[in-house]
Amino acid sequence: MARTGRVHYAWVVAGVAFATLVAAAAFRAAPGVLMVPLHEAGWSIVTMSAAVSVNLVLYGLIAPFAAALMERFGVRRVVCAGLLLIAAGAGLSVLATDAWQLVFTWGVLIGVGTGSMAMVFAATVANAWFVKRRGLVMGVLTAGGAAGQLVFLPLVAYLVETTNWQIASLLVAAAAVAVLPLVLTLLRDRPSDMGLAPYGSDQVVPPPVRGGNAAGLALSALREAARTRSFWALAGAFAICGATTNGLVGIHFVPAAHDHGMATTTAAGLLMVVGVFDILGTVASGWLTDRVDPRVLLLAFYAFRGVGLLLLPWLLGASVQPSMIVFIVVYGLDWVATVPPTVALCRNLFGDRGTIVFGWVFASHQLGAAVAALGGGIVRDTFGSYTYAWFAGAALCAVAAVLSIGMRRHRDDAPPSAAARREDRAAASETMSDLTP
């Protein structure tokens, strides 16, 4: 196993990626907290939900093209561009006076910026730099978003309460700018750039031949994957994942709790606790993905999530009861625990195009989140509460559980060989840094 010094450089790259994902998650923590003061300032819930929906759509649709761009132009360039777009969108949003301006800053600029990194960035790093511990690393990097929520959610809520929402938005811009020096100086595109083999391998993998364009690479991967039922099952289940996390709870939990008399800072604190347990749950999910059938994990995750949403209308109140704490802990453990097994299934089913295919699956995640974000706002303005939105989310989770357990695990229907089972447990049989067009 190639090393630089005593520590393989793959762990340095993973550390920089983690810090970058934490910073990029600053905006993910902001809308739910900012909706209350912006609503009091005259912005409608539907307008803000529409801006967030545009953000979520672009966040998802950019992902497969970002994976291809990282392959074509390198990870570092794409990540730097994404961070600059996030900073520009968050900074310019303080000047917004019309609905289109909020949609452009919150929606377009930040949506494209966050979509340029997000989970495809984590998958690209894990697949290129690691053979062993790939599932665990994917879980840790995915948890970077939860760590960002944990760091920035209470800060944003505090600034909203003590100053104004503009200062909180500028904090998001500052976070994106702060990690740029780390990316520029330490992040590398692939191990072969440093003459190294991936962690867990002794073979240096040469850089891929750069042919075609990023759009063509992404679209060809989609055409190939879309011919399989497993792709649509993955995409459908992950769309529901997005709807029931980022779309419903991430955006509407704080205003829903506020409707029941809970203080905004208290509700934001509960989401912060979700972030704490999200880190634990996602890392554990990555560890389990190396050892357990990913379909079984997804079945369990969606089932627990659905039960939580079904009970949520009776758990919300002016004060925090023990039952609400149980909900927050369970939902936190489950929040993005679906990501490592979903990435593993993409790798098992689509081989060397698994990262780009995961980009498309992730796009469906964000489309689901966008529909739920807008739908939640419409339900609230129409019925005066979020109750029907929570019930709809619970029903969708049941659908996701069925889709997950019913899909294939490998490319064919034959039972996996002993060698394949060892590959799933150890995530150590092949390197996926060479994505061919």
Image (cartoon, rainbow, N blue to C red):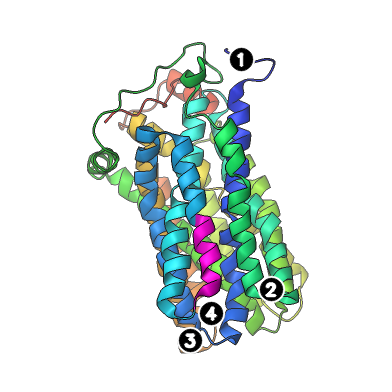
**Label 4 vs label 3: CA separation?**
9 Å
Highlighted magenta segment, given as a residue range? 86-96
Label 2 residue SS: helix
Q: Which of the two discs, 3 and 2, sits closer to the camera?
A: 2
- Quarter holding residue 56: bottom left
**Amino acid type, mark 2:** Val
**Residue at numbered disc 1:** 3
Residue 156 percent across, percent down from the top left: 68, 66
Q: Are marks 1 and 3 in contact (CB under 8 Å)?
A: no
Q: Which of the two discs, 4 and 3, sits closer to the camera?
A: 3
**Residue at numbered disc 3:** 381
**Residue at numbered disc 4:** 386
Closer to the chain start, of discs 1 and 4, is: 1
**Residue at numbered disc 2:** 160
Q: Which of the two discs, 1 and 4, sits closer to the camera?
A: 1
What residue lies at 35% left-to-right and 39% top-to-bottom? 68
Residue 399 percent across, percent down from the top left: 41, 59
**Label 2 vs label 1: CA separation?**
46 Å
From the viewer's perspective, is 326 left or right of 119?
right
Q: Are marks 3 and 2 in contact (CB under 8 Å)?
A: no
From the viewer's perspective, is 242 left or right of 94?
left
**Amino acid type, mark 4:** Tyr
Q: Are marks 4 and 3 in contact (CB under 8 Å)?
A: no
> Is residue 140 located in the magenta-colored stretch of the structure?
no
Count of numbered labels shown in the rendering: 4
Residue 238 visible to the viewer? yes
Q: Using the image as rendered, state which of residue 420 and residue 158 is in the foreground.
A: 158
**Label 1 vs label 4: CA separation?**
53 Å
